[in-house]
Image (cartoon, rainbow, N blue to C red):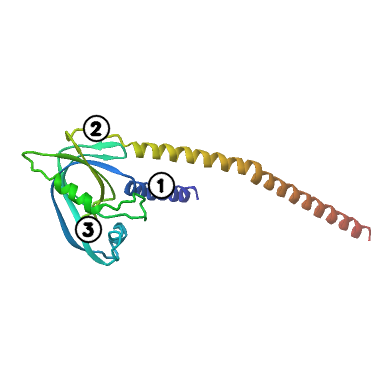
């Protein structure tokens, strides 16, 4: 039984960690080499990873998808850099609207124009920081969604993920507060109720034993 509980906890921890990794903002230092618009089919395999269509547009199973093609440097995962050369990375550029995740992005067209304005070649690179969420998977054709673009002077710029830091601090504090409240609830409500129920059960057993003893003495006299 303890092993089953441990497995369940590990599975829940992995699911929660994957959810946070997908949802929380990440920052990549990249060089934009092109932008394009493709026609994307949204199937049952990948539709869940896409936001709604642009605000004011009807949702369809096939729609135009804005892409930002880049060469990526120094990727930041949960505050830790993954270095080791350049690699290509493609980002999608979609409105999130009012749905989850709550980035409230309504300016995909403006962001696409900003990305086009920052296109550069390897001989004369212009580096930008793309803030995004989501994953890249070539097999089911999903892309991280770009949220913002900010020019920087160097690919080695140091980015501090303040939002993620504050979020995890808040998460830890909230967890400790809920844990303390639960312990107080158990101590003040659950434990007295269980103790009372146990005492009442002992009293019932004692009364039953006393009545049983009386009956035995009564029949023994006969």
For numbered disc 2, what is the local secondary structure?
loop
Vertical placement of residue 118 versus 160, above or below: below
Residue 113 appears at what percent x and percent y?
A: 18, 50
**Within 10 Å of the Cα at label 2, are there few (<14), some (14-19), or many (20+) other Cα atoms?**
few
Residue 67 appears at what percent x and percent y?
A: 19, 54
Mark 3 → mark 2, Cα distance in angstroms: 30 Å
Q: Nearest to the eye among marks 3 and 2: give it.
A: 2
Q: Nearer the viewer, residue 62 or 193?
A: 62
Mark 1 → mark 2, Cα distance in angstroms: 30 Å
Residue under circle 1? 13
Residue 112 appears at what percent x and percent y?
A: 19, 51
Residue under circle 2? 158
Name which residue lies at 26% across and 55% down: 94
**Within 10 Å of the Cα at label 3, are there few (<14), some (14-19), or many (20+) other Cα atoms?**
some
User: Can you say which quadrant of the picture contains the C terminus?
Assistant: bottom right
For numbered disc 1, what is the local secondary structure?
helix
Q: Earlier in the sequence, mark 3 or mark 2?
A: 3
Residue under circle 3? 141
For numbered disc 3, what is the local secondary structure?
loop
Name which residue lies at 22% across and 58% down: 141
Q: On the rendered structure, is 215 left or right of 139?
A: right
Q: Earlier in the sequence, mark 1 or mark 2?
A: 1
């Amino acid at each position: 039984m303890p092993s089953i509980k441990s497995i369940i906890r590990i599975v829940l921890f992995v699911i929660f960690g994957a959810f946070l990794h997908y949802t929380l903002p990440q920052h990549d230092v990249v060089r934009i080499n092109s932008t394009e618009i493709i026609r994307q089919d949204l199937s049952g395999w990948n539709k869940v990873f896409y936001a709604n269509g642009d605000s004011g547009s009807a949702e369809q199973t096939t729609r135009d998808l804005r892409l930002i093609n880049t060469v990526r440097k120094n990727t930041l995962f949960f505050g830790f850099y993954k270095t080791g050369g350049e690699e290509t990375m493609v980002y999608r550029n979609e409105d999130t609207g009012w749905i989850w995740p709550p980035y409230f992005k309504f300016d995909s067209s403006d962001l696409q124009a900003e990305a086009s304005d920052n296109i550069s070649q390897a001989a004369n690179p212009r580096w930008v920081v793309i803030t995004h969420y989501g994953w890249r998977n070539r097999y089911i054709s999903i892309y991280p969604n770009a949220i913002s673009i900010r020019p920087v002077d160097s690919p080695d710029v140091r980015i501090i993920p303040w939002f993620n830091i504050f979020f995890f601090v808040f998460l830890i504090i909230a967890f400790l507060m809920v844990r303390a409240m639960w312990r107080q609830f158990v101590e003040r409500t659950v434990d007295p109720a269980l103790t009372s129920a146990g005492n009442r059960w002992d009293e019932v057993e004692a009364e039953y034993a006393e009545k049983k003893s009386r009956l035995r003495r009564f029949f023994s006299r006969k």
